[in-house]
Amino acid sequence: MTRWCAFLACCLGVAAAAAADWPEFRGPGGRGLAAGEAAIRTTWSAEEGIAWKADLRGRGVSSPIVVGDLVVVTSSSGPRQERLHVIALDKATGEQRWERSFWATGRTLCHSTSAVAAGTPASDGERIVALFSSCDLVCLDLAGRLLWQRNLAVEHPRAGNDLGMGSSPRIIDGTVIVQIDCQGDPFAAGIDLATGDDRWSVPRDRIASWSSPLPVSFAGETTVLLQNPNGVELRRLADGELAWSWRGDCSGIPMTAAAGGMLYVPSAGIAAVPVGGGEPAWKGAKLSCGIASPVAWNGTVACVNRAGVLVIGAAADGRVRGQVRLSGSFWASPIVVGDLLVAVGKEGITFLVSTGDTPEIVAQNELPGTFTATPAVADGSLYLRSETALWKVAAPD
């Protein structure tokens, strides 16, 4: 195991997920790193290099997750996107194994670039939780049986906003973390995965944010990082008590990356904030994130800006090591697989970029559709979700 893999397992404070699983938004621990995945296919098209394609009911911008022999996605349908869907596909064939549908109980109005199925589901290997923009939270077993359901918009009638919610739930040591940031009744909660009952609930700043929670190791215990435009805070997993915070201007969409005891916060570029420390160790204006979240690994931090330029910098001081111009716009966050960075453009072009000091485009491959979901990877296969379909790129021969 490489050093960064060992640190990742330590940061999570939980048993490491199987290398074949991609159980939540941005993979294990939400860090965008495909641990144990050595290589993926470098060339494909709609006619070549595809294991399968599955058309999805309705639409959605949530990312797929991979759990055991299932690939799970969410979508929403109906005139007002009031019908919510959790869909499980067979990982090998793409055939639908089961689908469960629910009626939204909260508001379903959202921006045209988003959908009610915006948050990515999460799994602990035995259960699946899905949080929709309507603030409906459901928990299913791997056979699709409903275990419990929370109508958070009924419990918090002013939760939600007219652009739609976008935060993904996180499962940490049997606790489901939800982050509901809005102008009306914002809160974050730790919910018992087995029962659906609150373990804790805390109010948040009345400001909209679409970032997702992140597990971070602090002072020998697992904490949860919550981010909004006013800054970041770490709350104890056990009781939600505030452990540490940093106040500063932050982006409301891309989420912080954590590595090596440092938080790489999207803040007018990147602010490298020591966990539990004071002022940022450095600020890098050239490391601008746009909408996609940054990724940090092996002493490196990288991000894709609004102009479609991938910038790779040194995690120690923010010095730009190299950059390469991609093309199009990027809503999906980049991930790292082996020695390649994978960046999926909204227009359907996936760029594979080398991650050395002089980054270069190794390959670019196009699929039809609009792609705003962050990809998943498992067993050498890449899963790419458009608004209406899911593609599995076959593993290398």
Image (spheres, rainbow, N blue to C red):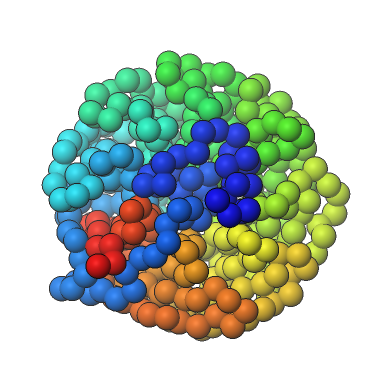
Q: Residue furthest front?
A: 1
Q: Is residue 143 left or right of residue 294?
A: left
Residue 279 seen from this side: yes
Judging depth in this view, the residue of 75 and 378 nearest the camera is: 378
Query: Residue 18: x and y, percent?
Result: 41, 41
Q: Looking at the rendering, which quadrant does residue 46 occupy?
A: bottom left
Judging depth in this view, the residue of 326 and 158 nearest the camera is: 326
- Label count reads 0
Query: Residue 95: x and y, percent?
Result: 13, 47
Q: Residue furthest right?
A: 278
Judging depth in this view, the residue of 27 and 183 nearest the camera is: 27
Judging depth in this view, the residue of 44 and 83 nearest the camera is: 44
Q: Is residue 351 left or right of residue 262?
A: left
Residue 209 seen from this side: no
Query: Residue 297: x and y, percent?
Result: 61, 60
Query: Residue at left 17%, top 55%?
Result: 55
Q: Quadrant of the C terminus?
A: bottom left
Vertical position of residue 360 compared to residue 395: above or below: below
Query: Residue 25: x and y, percent?
Result: 45, 47
Query: Residue at left 23%, top 47%?
Result: 91
Vertical position of residue 124 compared to residue 251: above or below: above
Query: Residue at left 45%, top 82%?
Result: 361
Q: Looking at the rendering, which quadrant does residue 249 occupy?
A: bottom right
Vertical position of residue 101 compared to residue 54: above or below: above
Query: Residue at left 61%, top 73%?
Result: 312
